[in-house]
Image: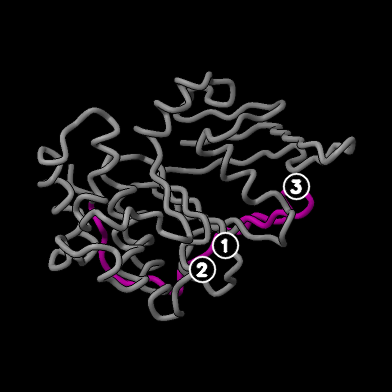
Amino acid sequence: MLELTGVVKEYRIGEQPVRALDGIDLRIEAGEFTSIIGPSGSGKSTLLHLLGALDSPDSGSITFDGNEIGTLGDDAQSEFRRHRVGFVFQFFNLLPTLTAWENVAIPKLLDGKGLRKAKPRALELLDLVGLADRADHRPGEMSGGQMQRVAVARALIMDPPLILADEPTGNLDSKTGAAILELFGRIADGGTGIVMVTHDMGAVQYCDRVVTLRDGRIGSDERLTRTGRTEGTVQVPA
């Protein structure tokens, strides 16, 4: 689904160039739940930004389903992000004045659709993540775990083949975080690729694969048997 070949990304701090990614070769398959781990400054966030077309590499190739995305212009990058990638963040990024279903439907609104037309799909996805009874609640009326489930539903509403998660359990207690990771695993089993950046080593047991970054390079790449998985597959309704 997603392939990086010789990807390099540099930034400048003052006059000093810093190579955040140094020749990354990586292939991500559909339906694979991959965690990216490594110390601060290892290049994890930079890699996630490139995978989501939030930034472009200085050299190398990034292809998605065989199409080059590393050299897309701004408009094409925006189009790719809207329709091919769902994002889940550490801090949820929900709009406090909107209800759960309205927050889920926001990407449809940005794509030119009316909120009311998107409501049935939003309700369907809230049911998928176990929040059918919270559809009309606002973020201030929900727990952290419930807000993160709303964020997961929002990431799914455009039916993306890829979800990128940046520290999705960072603001959750261990039990709630485990429930979110189990949900990701079941979504991956339904065919959606998931790439998660995390500092939480306990999260690895829920993944199919763990890639370790060190100084902008891949230090290790290990395929796993999910010990934290639960039975069942989440098929995202079309």
Under mark 3, the amino acid is Arg
N-terminal-most mark, 3 or 2: 2
The segment highlighted magenta reads 211-235
Residue 103 % position (x, y): 26, 51
Q: Is residue 87 above or below residue 75?
A: below
Q: Residue at x 48, y 60 (%)?
A: 90
Disc 1 crowd, CA 10 A, few/some/many (<14, 14-19, 20+):
many
Q: Please, which residue is most extreme toward the right here?
A: 15
Residue 145 % position (x, y): 35, 71
Q: Is residue 156 magenta?
A: no
The label shown at residue 198 is 1
Q: Is residue 9 above or below residue 217?
A: above
Q: Please, which residue is most extreme toward the front here?
A: 97
Residue 190 % position (x, y): 29, 52
- The residue nearer to you, when weighing 78 against 51, is 78
- Mark 1 vs 2: CB contact within 8 A: yes
Instruction: Indicate the quadrant containing the C terminus: top left, top right, bottom left or bottom right.
Output: top left
The label shown at residue 170 is 2
For the residues labelled 1 and 2, the Cα–Cα distance comes to 8 Å
Q: Residue at x 47, y 54 (%)?
A: 165
Under mark 1, the amino acid is Thr
For the residues labelled 3 and 2, the Cα–Cα distance comes to 24 Å
- Mark 3 vs mark 2, foreground winner is 2
- Mark 1 vs mark 2, foreground winner is 2
Which residue lies under the disc numbered 3?
A: 217
